[in-house]
Amino acid sequence: MIVPVVLSGGTGTRLWPLSNVQRPKQFLPLVSDYTLLQETIRRLDNMDVDCCPPLIVCNEAHRAIIQQQLIAIDCEAAELICEPEGRNTAPAVAAAALLAKQRYPGERIDLIVLPADQSIKNTQQLSSAVVAALFASKAGALVTFGISPNRPDTGYGYIKKGIQQGEFYSVDFFVEKPGIKRATSYLKSGDYLWNSGIFIFDADIYLTELKNFSPKILKSTRLAVDGAKIFSDGILLDRKTFVSCPSDSIDYAVMEHTSKAVVMPLDAGWNDVGSWDRLHELNEHDKAGNSLVGNVLALDCQDNYLRSNNRFVAGIGLSNLIVVDSPGGLLVASRSKAQEVAKITSELDTIDTSSNKPTCLLDETASYQVIRLQLVAGANITLEDAKDSLEKARCIVVLKGEAHIVVGLDTIPVIAGKSFEVPSDTVINKIINPDNKISTTLMAIHID
């Protein structure tokens, strides 16, 4: 039995301003008309193996977005494992392995672990590699895929190859994103592969090795699964126990320690879509090497990435720049600094944005208030963020766009021209703008 596990907990900070905490890159259509998450799910349909419905590990805040995107591609059979807080890939996959064993008791289960935010051009090559890796998994190996580097990239993790065993190599060690000198030496040596983050292994063997090398992770995750809240399309892991779980990757929690780890080179047009420069690689170019996406014009420009899903953007005489315009912000950066875009999100946390609050009081009397809420593309507003606006709201009217209104564990979609009356014994926990292109305007009516 083969169970895909899709990891959808990343934040994609290097793709600001389109990618943000509320709507990370996996929920954006960056390389096709489908989002990266949808592309990952659809890729499973083209495998030469029969897979069970996928388990999707995600942040609980993204449940509504994922539900919407799965419905759009007719994949409503997927089951969600919602994390109250991200704890890296080792606990995430442990939770998936434990849930898979519950769902398919007594069955031997191979897990195919796939990040939700990658692009793979050659699905057939991936499928062939998966088939080969499944044979190794059945023999007891923990398999990961590595990508042969073609440049000294400092944005990827690396895997040091060990002894060759047919199509596979033993794993000597993993390296987090190295500096340029070390990355250059790795490329010259030919002994290193980029770490793809894709794994295939037997669920029981993974859990056994996790117990051997990171027992606290397994113990905490097991308690979080056992204490999870159950809803119609998945579970919400117990907050107290899961937040206390050590945070670590599969690479360091298991793969570096076990003798069962092997790496298989994968040549399938893999790209982690981890920066705007990577998207420049993926997209088509004009004769001058420019990648132009959306409402843009380039005159006398060379080797740029220009993107706007918002207003019209024109560039003249630009070279090796990234220009991305969105309702959430405007980015202008050198392509050589693409890996440093994540620093912007850290800086934004220290900036006072009180003058740009998404709420505005429109009308007020002794018996009611009318408040306008403006959510930019992909944004959301929570009870914690806007207690005065949401706690007393009895009716929400959507004037423009669409809103997903979260009340408890329920998510109610409301389109423009429609309203939602809040039950008297409940409060709104969150309002989400599910659209990544247009803003949403709402009115919240308070009645005292």
Image (cartoon, rainbow, N blue to C red):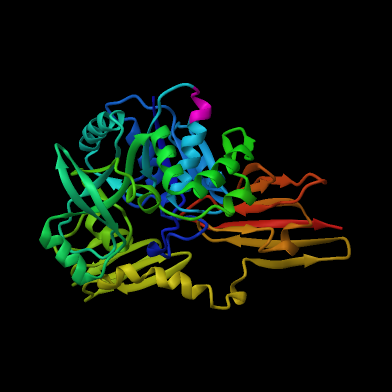
**Residue found at x 48% / y 43%:** 57
- The answer to whether residue 147 is visible is yes
Residue placed furthest toward the front: 212
Q: Position of residue 162 (x, y in %)?
A: 18, 49
Q: Is residue 383 above or below residue 255?
A: below
Please name whichever residue, 406 or 397, is drawn nearer the observer in this view of the structure: 406
Q: Is residue 238 above or below residue 73?
A: below
Please name whichever residue, 161 or 433, is drawn nearer the observer in this view of the structure: 161
Query: Which region of the structure is painted magenta?
Result: 101-105
- The N terminus - image quarter: top left
- The answer to whether residue 402 is visible is no
**Residue found at x 37% / y 53%:** 252
Q: Position of residue 67 (x, y in %)?
A: 53, 40
Residue 104 part of the magenta-drawn span: yes
Please name whichever residue, 262 or 368, is drawn nearer the observer in this view of the structure: 262
Q: Is residue 31 left or right of residue 303?
A: right
Q: Is residue 206 left or right of residue 124?
A: right
Residue 197 part of the magenta-drawn span: no
Dominant secondary structure of the residues highlighted in magenta in the image: helix
Q: Position of residue 259 (x, y in %)?
A: 29, 43
Q: Position of residue 53 (x, y in %)?
A: 44, 29
- The C terminus - image quarter: bottom right
Q: How many marks?
A: 0
Q: Is residue 111 above or below residue 93?
A: above
Please name whichever residue, 307 or 430, is drawn nearer the observer in this view of the structure: 430
